[in-house]
Image (cartoon, grey):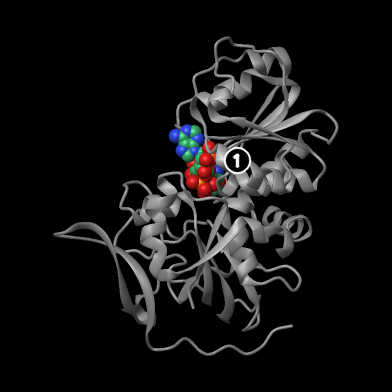
């Protein structure tokens, strides 16, 4: 069911990242449609979110924003205003994650976005833009990770599935999705105070970050049937050496480091699968599969404990918070 939405107005609000004599910084600006990048679809953005990458961009860390000025925000959800391709009628609720928005072209921290229609996914069923941004890139990535593990033969009953960085956005949604699919989840966290939260999401075992077996030998005692890793570095190297024969690791992130010092032995002696997850360039059919499964396994009632909602004004402070590893679960931004 769709309804008419207002036309693109002459001015609208955006949080912009820019560089001037004061250095890299963000400020609220009033933009006009002429400021929007090229594209064949216009979306009225009602919600966005804060991911780790957004934290880096808004805090002025180099590497995420490829040009300036730029509207950060790698996620957006809202309703279609116009679509020159005819794929979506005005008013259709849509979600867009990745494809370089908030990195290479303007992203979700503005009331309107002009994008490529082929990047959009219709929000499944009767679900809302708030739900879609409660999931966001982090939850979508967790879903891709679970799908990758399942595609490589992981089924419930094979043993423990480890989630690292479990209290973060990708980690929390991975715990909830794995539990919903019947897996036994072991959540690794550096925040022992989040034990009750992680158990409420469905984790069976909680282990401290420091308890994760770090790599001492090429092959450690076999423990994990599968792994969703958001941390990288030593934690990933240790998990990889402890993954069971024919088990798989879905490698999502680098919150703890981008290095991976290891050997080929788990690959060639245990047939372990080291699987890369890239949510940004994920092809459209896989996106739709992932969003449909998210709608089934992470409905609003299950997502609610993971999310908190903030206005756009709070994004700069939230950026610092997520970089400090202090954000629990997912942060939804109400844009309009
Ligand atoms: P969050 O900040 O929400 O979560 C990261 C979690 O990692 C933290 O909550 C914390 O979990 C843990 N952590 C933080 N710092 C360290 C550290 N120094 N050592 C060990 N663990 C640490 O971020 P997101 O969930 O949004 O993103 C997680 C990672 O996944 C990031 O690296 C991000 O860039 C990446 N990512 C990749 C995507 C892809 O397509 N491949 C898409 C989305 C994200 P706890 O407190 O429980 O220990």
> Which residue is tagged 1?
166
Residue 185 location (% of width, % of height): 73, 36
Element type where label 1 sits in the image: loop
Q: Is residue 87 left or right of residue 7?
A: right
Q: Is residue 123 left or right of residue 263?
A: right
* 29 versus 25 height, above or below: below
Q: Is residue 157 left or right of residue 10?
A: right
Q: Is residue 254 visible?
A: no
Where, by quadrant of the figure, is residue 29 drawn? bottom left
Indicate if the residue with disc 1 has its beta carbon within 8 Å of ligand 1. yes
Task: Name the residue: 53% across, 17% down.
Answer: 262
Task: Name the residue: 64% across, 66% down.
Answer: 131
Residue farthest to the right? Answer: 157
Residue farthest to the left? Answer: 21
The one nearer the camera, 113 or 168, is: 168
Residue 104 location (% of width, % of height): 40, 57
Dot 1: within a 10 Å radius of its alpha carbon, few (fewer than 14), some, or many (20 or more) residues?
many
């Amino acid at each position: 069911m769709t309804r008419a939405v207002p036309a693109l107005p002459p001015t609208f609000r955006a949080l912009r990242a820019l560089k001037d004599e004061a250095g890299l910084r963000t400020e609220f600006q009033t933009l006009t449609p002429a400021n929007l990048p090229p594209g064949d679809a216009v979306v009225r953005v009602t919600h966005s979110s804060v991911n780790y990458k957004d934290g880096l961009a808004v805090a002025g860390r180099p590497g995420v924003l490829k040009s300036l000025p730029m509207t950060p925000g790698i996620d957006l959800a809202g309703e279609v205003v116009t679509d020159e391709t005819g794929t979506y009628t005005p008013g259709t609720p849509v979600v867009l994650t990745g494809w370089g928005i908030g990195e290479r072209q303007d992203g979700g921290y503005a009331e309107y976005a002009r994008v490529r229609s082929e990047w959009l996914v219709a929000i499944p069923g009767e679900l809302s833009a708030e739900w879609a941004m409660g999931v966001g890139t982090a939850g979508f990535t967790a879903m891709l990770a679970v799908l990758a593990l399942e595609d490589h033969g992981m089924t419930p009953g094979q043993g423990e599935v480890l989630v690292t960085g479990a209290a973060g956005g990708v980690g929390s949604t991975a715990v909830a999705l794995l539990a919903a699919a019947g897996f036994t989840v072991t959540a690794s966290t550096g925040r022992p105070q989040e034990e009750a939260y992680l158990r409420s999401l469905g984790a069976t075992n909680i282990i401290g970050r420091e308890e994760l077996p770090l790599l001492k030998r090429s092959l450690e005692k076999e423990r994990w049937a599968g792994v969703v890793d958001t941390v990288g570095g030593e934690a990933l190297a240790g998990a990889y050496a402890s993954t069971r024969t024919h088990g798989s690791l879905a490698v999502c992130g680098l919150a703890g480091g981008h290095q991976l010092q290891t050997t080929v032995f788990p690959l060639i002696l245990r047939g372990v699968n080291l699987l890369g997850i890239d949510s940004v360039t994920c092809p459209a059919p896989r996106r739709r599969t992932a969003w449909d499964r998210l709608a089934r396994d992470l409905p609003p009632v299950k997502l609610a404990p993971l999310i908190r909602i903030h206005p756009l004004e709070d994004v700069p402070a939230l950026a610092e918070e997520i970089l400090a590893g202090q954000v629990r679960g997912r942060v939804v931004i109400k844009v309009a």
